[in-house]
Image (spheres, rainbow, N blue to C red):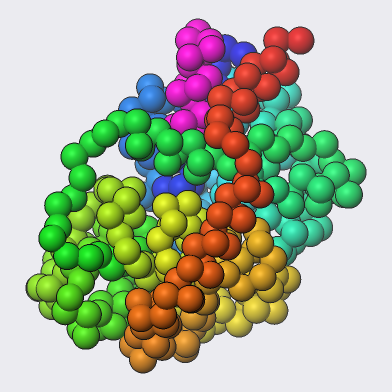
Amino acid sequence: MKKVFILVGEASGDLHASNLIKETKAIDANISWQGWGGDLMSQQGVELKKHIRDLSFMGFLEVLLNIRTILNNFKLCKQHIEAFNPDVLLLVDYPGFNLRMAKWAKERGISVVYYISPQIWAWKASRIKAIKETVDKMYCILPFEKEYYQKQGLSVSYFGHPLIDAKRNYESLKSEKISTSKSVIAILPGSREQEINRKLDIMLLSMVNYDNFQIVVACAPNLPSSFYDNYRSKYSFAEFVSGQTYDILSIADFAVVTSGTATLETAIFKVPQVVCYKSSYLSYRIAKWLVNIKFISLVNLIMDKEIVVELIQKEVSVKNIQKELDALVFDNSNRERMLNDYNKMLELLGDEGCSKKIAQDLIGYYSK
């Protein structure tokens, strides 16, 4: 395995990909990396051909409105891969784009590895046929996914969840933490402009009664600081911190979190949370029709029961956020129940070393 082209479309994928690349390089430094991704991958020596800030489109309506850009991205990506002529195409999450690239690459004799398997258990189960035909090696990161894929006749590997490693790596850095004399409520509004603009005003308006807390907003590193200027001017009581989500979670006492990877990160840091999800009306109705899952947060999905409260669409209101946050701030039993469930979830996720184990398995697979 000498030349790898890696495709990442979101901030969470950039994090997990960077840790996998780091562990792979520790075993075999003679690999040339190119790809699409973010700053963390670049720091690990990947020659970026396109940045994730240009790739994130949230929801069905947003995809339709940006369809020309997306189609151009397919064309551009194929050009980049052909110019690099890799031995392996390493796909990370981002299934709407990556599965199409997998088919194209397989037809050209490029070996395809998929890391962070597509969540076809939630929707588009029909994709299993395309996955079987195009993916040579797959790694899942949720404990129930291995059994699901095996029942579909596909061989997959599960070595744990990479966020366990991400937290361990963060703790080993001993970076200078955010200083505050108050207890902290963290707000994690997401990494895409659309989702932030739909919820951040509501989230911050919900904080006006929490005078005894320092309110800290985790700003997405993929967005310019100026994006948050309007929010800074309206909500002077809040502190806006960019690119330091783990620093924020490490000192947070409570959190209001956008559904997605951040819900699991918050749980791993053992911060009691309220989860919010709000997309465009059309995107939500289409998703409601197509998606077959009981929960939207990873914490609840992994445990298969409600561990954290999920506020969805119209439920994302100042009144509701305050109500659910109060239930955690002022009721010790609710808070302890959530923390105990977090511990049970961590047992299901498994031990540390996910990225290293995948790197070893992947290099061993291609060394046969």
Q: Position of residue 39 (x, y in %)?
A: 33, 37
Q: Position of residue 250 (x, y in %)?
A: 32, 51
Q: Is residue 6 above or below residue 98?
A: above
Judge left or right: residue 362 versus residue 46: right
Judge left or right: residue 65 versus residue 107: left
Q: Position of residue 36 (x, y in %)?
A: 45, 37
Report which quarter residue 101 is drawn in. top right
Q: Is residue 237 above or below residue 144?
A: below
Number of numbered discs on residues: 0
Task: Tell me what residue is drawn at x 81 percent, y 52 percent.
Answer: 148
Q: Nearer the viewer, residue 341 or 87?
A: 341
Task: Tell me what residue is drawn at x 20 percent, y 55 percent.
Answer: 241
Residue 214 is one of the magenta-drawn residues: no
Q: Position of residue 202 (x, y in %)?
A: 31, 82
Judge left or right: residue 249 versus residue 10: left
Residue 52 visible here? yes
Residue 23 is one of the magenta-drawn residues: yes
Residue 260 visible here? no
Question: Farthest residue in the front direction?
Answer: 333
Report which quarter residue 293 is drawn in. bottom right
Task: Tell me what residue is drawn at x 38 percent, y 22 percent.
Answer: 45
Q: Nearer the viewer, residue 262 or 74?
A: 262
Task: Tell me what residue is drawn at x 73 percent, y 31 percent.
Answer: 137
Instruction: Please state the extent of the stretch shown in magenta in the rendering.
Output: 17-33
Question: Farthest residue in the bottom direction?
Answer: 319
Report which quarter residue 299 is drawn in. bottom right
Q: Is residue 139 above or below residue 265?
A: above
Q: Quadrant of the C terminus?
A: top right
Q: Quadrant of the N terminus?
A: top right
User: What secondary structure do most residues of the magenta stretch adopt?
Assistant: helix
